[in-house]
Image: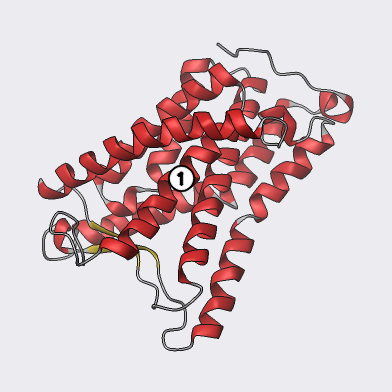
Amino acid sequence: MHTQPYQVQGADAELPDRTLRSETLIVLALSLGASGVSALIDFIGSVTRPGALKNQAATLVGSYAPHRPWLDLAWQLFSIATALAPVALVAHLLGRERAGMRAIGFDLTRPRPDLARGAVVAAVVGGTGLAFYLGVRAAGFNLTVVPESLPDVWWKIPVLVLSAVQNAVLEEVIVVGYLLRRLDRLGWTPTAALAASAVLRGSYHLYQGLGGFFGNMAMGVLFVLLYRRWGRVGPLVAAHALIDTVAFVGYAVLAGKVGWLPTA
């Protein structure tokens, strides 16, 4: 298992824990920590709204400018690019340590092993996750998840794939690589760091319902364990991107054509 101690070099060796804690909170406040609070508010709105959760919908990738495809495309690309700004911040912070993104295994030094491992993880997690979602939705604990509701235009599939990659990069770099590195540096135990990462991952999926929360928390536990073993977020990014790509594109192709796939 990959349990190499955190190493700091240069200026960061002089930074007190208080500064590192503040830095971590700022990164989360600008990214998935804020998303977790937003998802909680959204969930409260859903459970206090008349009607069962499964009769409500949560859309993941929707249109910003209906009936105006070029403006919609501009907004889609803008949204994807700005969502990655916290990743750029993490790259800057890790570069300040003279470690860089290679320190968390987000680089192109091992593309084939990363992709191969990611494909295996995606196959296991994707199939299990779909079965879990269908079960908890049928039980009334989850909203109907609508992976995409984009218009039928030429850029639909490319935007869905880009959105999947953006989700993967943002989540795995922040919630696994960066957060665990900082918590290790601050002296958290591996178990406490795993719990924090997993609960954070579940929190920003709470807008989907309790199934989204617990399902993604379980995925978070698995991803942390794999990261500890491999020492790289690369396979996790690949797995996450494949899972979301199949979900987005698969829904675009199958929605309304198969009876087992819920639609809004």
Nearer the observer, 156 or 229: 156
Identify the residue under disc 1.
242
The front one of 8 and 2 is 2
| Residue at horizontal 46 percent and vertical 71 percent from the top | 156
In this orientation, which residue lies closer to the viewer: 239 or 82? 239
Q: Residue at x 61, y 22 (%)?
A: 231
Q: Which residue does the image show at 42% across and 84% down from the upper left?
A: 66
- Placement of 68 over or under 250, stated as above or below: below
Q: Position of residue 37 (x, y in %)?
A: 43, 51
Query: Which quadrant of the figure contains the C terminus?
Result: bottom left
Residue 65 at least partly seen: yes
User: Residue 100 falls in which quadrant of the image?
Assistant: top right
Residue at far right of view? 10
Can you say whether 150 is above or below 69 in the image? above
The answer to whether residue 76 is above or below residue 243 is below
How is the protein colored in the picture? secondary structure
Expressed as whole percent of the image width and height from the top left, the position of residue 102 reads 73, 31
The image quadrant that residue 214 belongs to is top left
Q: Secondary structure at mark 1?
A: helix
Q: Looking at the picture, how far across and down is residue 16, in whole percent?
A: 76, 27
Give the class, few, some or many, for how many residues have Cα within 10 Å of label 1's Cα (few <14, many ≥20). many
**Does residue 185 lie above or below 167 as drawn?**
above
Residue 176 makes an appearance in the image: no
Nearer to the camera, 37 or 256: 256
Horizontal side, residue 42 vs residue 65: left or right: left
Q: Percent from the top left, x then y, of residue 230?
A: 58, 20
Quadrant into which the N terminus falls: top right
